[in-house]
Structure formats: structure tokens, C-alpha cells
Image: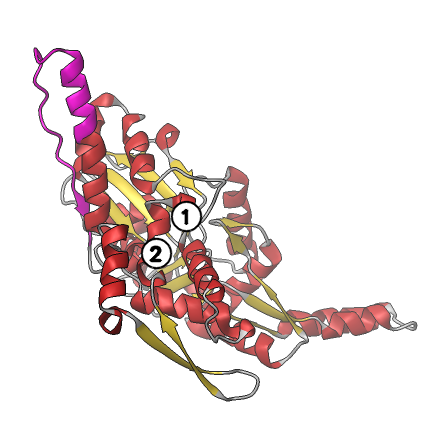
Amino acid sequence: MDPATSRPAIVIDNGSGYTKMGFAGNVEPCFIEPTVVAVNESFLNQSRTSSKANWVAQHNAGVMADLDFFIGDEALAKSRSSSTYNLSYPVHHGQVDNWDAMERFWQQCIFNYLRCDPEDHYFLLTESPLTAPESREYTGEIMFETFNVPGLYIAVNSVLALAAGYTTSKVGGVVVDIGDGATHVVPVADGYVIGGSIRSIPIAGKDVTLFVQQLMRERGENVPPEDSFEVARKVKEMYCYTCSDIVKEFNKHDKEPAKYIKQWRGIKPKTGAPYSCDIGYERFLGPEVFFNPEIYSNDFTTSLPVVIDKCIQSAPIDTRRALYKNIVLSGGSTMFKDFHRRLQRDIKKIVDARALASEARANGEIKSQPVEVNVLSHPIQRFAVWFGGSVLASTPEFFTV
């Protein structure tokens, strides 16, 4: 019997903002770390600038640089405390674009965080639905040749999100996956992705953070510039919510500011002095970029409900009703309060308007059946992809594929 099959598989979900890692069979990942690597460049710089630099010096500097690096929160802390560490974000918009940094990141994940021997465990990694085949080859090359893993399965994250227990029968539905760096709308029928209908939009969680940061800066809030992005991110995660009507929400804030305006208190990183600022309209304007993107960007102005509707309308006609009935949310940026209710309401409006228009064209001779629109919110949607991978990798079939 292969000893690797008797041990739990390792599930790593690499996102643009955060990486979730842990062992199959668990409900939540063991570690959630920012997908960032800090490498000490001083060794390499010394060997480059030295006039007597020989091969040995360069080799030693290279070895030291290979050893001296950190990932996740440790990397961010090192870059703040020392100028010799350069930050590298290996994943952009859901795609790996720095394979050296990615390999280092996986090395730390396996040996420092999960503390296991990669030769003793099967691995399940995730990828974006629009990933090129070459990327899968690179991943396989690193896993098999560098880490010598006994088995590797690379799964499309949207299918895993559906497999996370939302549906009991055949896996089918539309996955709205909004992470930190990418937003994908992926229709799945009978467990297979309908490739031609995938939609991707250039607005994701990081854009919400940048918009909150911009709103606070324009209002002249007393936030230290070097800390403003981190404060905006925390404000987004702790205080933002989705409203049903912007105008009504503005009126509410203006009538009862004491009830709706929150206070943020922090400490300036350089001086250690305390500071405070108000959190006002950005609480509901942040998530609004998904429903009215023109308030944030002039380049992309199609709202998320319209993108989802177009995605389903481009799918085969016999799958559309089932897709509308099972719209599944996945990713940390779908966790805003009432996000699923607003999304369901707006999609339902589009569908009902189309049905009325078709009846009008038929002069009332044809009565269309109402289309059920259902957006599913779930307590585990933040880790839906990782949890789906955990469920899949804990089945006996996983080791036999």
C-alpha cells in the first residue's frame, strides 16, 4: 500500500491576495497568509557591486538570498522593518506571473507552515478558470521535480466552490468568485465548466479597498499615508455593507450621523502617536462598485448583475433555468452584509424585464413561465474553494484518478 494514500492530502488555494492551505478533511484551512514573498536582495547586490566579485562570492550570495526569505504576514513585517527586503506578489489577477517567487512561496508553505514532507502527501492545487495550459505545466514541473510529490491534482476553483456542498445532485450552477485580484463568473453544468460562457471583470476586492482609500483621502481624513491602504482594507472588512438604494442611504447618514458614522482609531507607524478618523459614506459606497462601477472606473461600466445575466444567456438554452436557480457566491469579497440579496434582486429585475418585453412583442399571445432566480449565500463562502478541495481530496477516488 502506498503510504502517501494513508495520509491526508494537502490542499493549497493560491489567490491573488491570500493563500489558504491545510489538510484534506478539515473544515477550514490551517493557515491563511497573504500571497507575498520578501527576499533579502542585499546579498546579491553586494556581489554585483563588488569589483572583485568572483564566481564563489556570487554563488554564496545567491545561496544566502535563496535561504533568506519570508512569506505572508512575516514578509510584510520584514519589509516594514528593513529596507533590504523586496516584496514580490507572485499572483496577479488570478494568474502566476513570477514562478521563482511562487516556488519559494510553496517551499515555505510546505516546510515552515504545514511542516510536512511533500514526498509523503498527495497535493491538490487550484487554478483560475482562464489559466493557460502552460501554467499547469510549470506547476506540475515544480511540484514533481522540486518537491518530488507522489501525486498532484490541479482543480478549477469555481468547480470546487460548487462542490463545497451547495448542491446535492449533479454539480451545476453559476459560481460568482470574487477574490482580491480577480472576479470570475463561471457557469458549470453537470460538473463541467461551460468554457465559452465564462466572464471576467476587472473589479475585485482590491479595487474596493482602493476606492475606500480614495474616498477617505478626498475627505481629508487624518490617516498616515504609509498606513492608508491597510486602514482602508480593515475598514472594508469590518464596516462595509451593501445597501438597497444609494440615495436613501445618503439620507440616512445625513439625518442620523451619530448612528451610522463610525470611528477608526489607530497608531501612526513612524511616531507611535494615536490618531482617529471618521468612517462615513464609504461604508456602503465601497461594495457599490460591483453594482455601479462607473463611480469608480471609467474603463469598465458594466455592473455585476448584468455580467452574470449575459453569462447565463450565452450558455446552452436548456441549462439556463438551472443556472439562474443556483447562483453560488465564493470568495472573501462576497461577504458584505446583504450582498446576496442585492445581487438576487438586481438579476431578477433584468430577467423579469426581458420576460415582459417578450410578452409585449407577442401581443400577450404567449405567456412566459416565471424564471426562478436564487443567489445562495453560505457561511463557508469565504473558504468555499478551499473547502471544496478539502472535500474532494478526502474521498477515496481522489487517489485513484
Q: Residues within 10 Å of mark 1 (few under 14, many from 20)?
A: some
Give x and y (percent) for residue 282: 36, 61
**Amino acid type assigned to the residue bearing label 1 in the image:** Ile
The residue that appears at 18% across and 36% down in the rendered structure is 348
| Chosen colour scheme | secondary structure
Give x and y (percent) for residue 242: 26, 55
Quadrant including the C terminus: top left
Which quarter of the picture shows residue 362? Answer: top left
135 versus 222 height, above or below: above
Query: Is residue 302 left or right of 396 when viewed as pictured?
Result: right
Which sits in the foreground, 34 or 13? 34
Q: How far, Cα to Cα, is label 2 from label 1? A: 9 Å
**Amino acid type assigned to the residue bearing label 2 in the image:** Leu
Residue occupying the far front of the picture = 255
193 versus 243 height, above or below: above
The tag on residue 295 is 1
The residue that appears at 59% across and 75% down in the rendered structure is 79
* Local SS, label 2: helix
Q: Are marks 2 and 1 in contact (CB under 8 Å)?
A: yes
Which sits in the foreground, 131 or 285? 285
Q: Residues within 10 Å of mark 2 (few under 14, many from 20)?
A: many
Q: Is residue 359 magenta?
A: yes
The residue that appears at 29% across and 59% down in the rendered structure is 382
Q: Which residues are magenta?
A: 352-377
Quadrant including the N terminus: bottom left
Q: Is residue 360 magenta?
A: yes
Which sits in the foreground, 115 or 7? 115
Q: Which residue is mark 2?
A: 285
